[in-house]
Image (cartoon, rainbow, N blue to C red):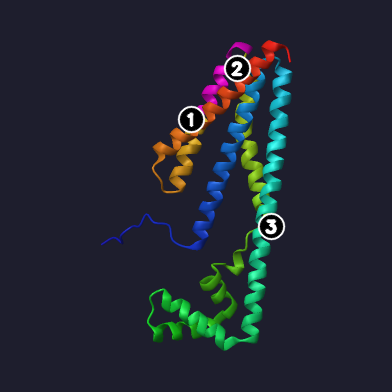
Amino acid sequence: MTEPTHDEAHGGALGSRLNWLRAAVLGANDGIVSTAGLVVGVAGATQSRSALLTAGLAGLLAGSMSMAAGEYVSVSTQRDSEMAALAVERRELREQPEAELLELTELLAERGLSREVAREAAEQLTARDALRAHARVELGIDPDELTNPWNAAWASFLSFTVGALLPLLAIVLPPAGWRLPVTVASVLGALVLTGWSSARLGAAAPRRAVVRNVAGGALAMGVTYAAGTLLGATGV
């Protein structure tokens, strides 16, 4: 007989990897939409390849650096909070070990264990590694896998850059008459992919996510193109 297979993901490590994948997909999506809106808006005002390249490259660099800096600050704040919580827990374990053992017992009992089993489990976990036990059960933190702000910053930088390259190349490589339709088609196709990917990673139905993603991107390009066309027509 073969063992039954399970589709559910188990384990904190897999959950962490899925979170990073979702962040990468969303970063690429931001790069696609923001850069597409920028270059399409400029295309509404001018057909100059150099102007489109300059605007697109400036948007790519500004967006990727902004994403990286924002992610670094955000994750650094989260890491500082995690380390502060661990420091408090370490001090409490040193100063009042019996109270912490009772607290761990109560937390385990709240998860469905009988009082006796919860006490025994708390004692065994405390004997093995008290800080790790409290961090995981009480705080929901894995001391061995604290968030890394540099990893988050580089991931955001790269994912945004990859996403932004698509509309940038699509607007500057084709002949003048094909630039706008090629860019719009490429961007909408990419948004279908990122919308589907984000939905699948989140175990959600992809159709609604794809529609939202494509509609948002199309609206962004439509608004910026209209603004660019208006500014180009007025000679601003």
Quarter of the image with the C terminus is top right
Quarter of the image with the N terminus is bottom left
Q: Residue at x 45, y 77 (%)?
A: 108
Q: Position of residue 157 (x, y in %)?
A: 67, 43
Q: Position of residue 93 (x, y in %)?
A: 61, 82
Secondary element at tag 3: helix
Read off the magenta span. 176-188
**Numbered badge on residue 120:** none
The mark lying in front, picked from 3 and 1, is: 1
Q: Is residue 214 left or right of residue 163?
A: left
- Closer to the chain start, of discs 3 and 1, is 3
Within the image, what quadrant is residue 169 found in? top right
Q: Residue at x 33, y 57 (%)?
A: 5
Name which residue type carries label 3: Ser
Q: Is residue 171 above or below residue 68?
A: above
Residue position marked by numbered label 1 in the rendering: 215
Of all residues, the one furthest to the left in this rendering is 1
Mark 3 crowd level (few <14, some 14–19, many ≥20, 10 Å Cα)? some
Secondary element at tag 2: helix
Residue position marked by numbered label 3 in the rendering: 76
State the separation of the CA atoms marked 3 and 1: 34 Å
The secondary structure that dominates the magenta segment is helix
Residue position marked by numbered label 2 in the rendering: 179
Q: Residue at x 55, y 76 (%)?
A: 134
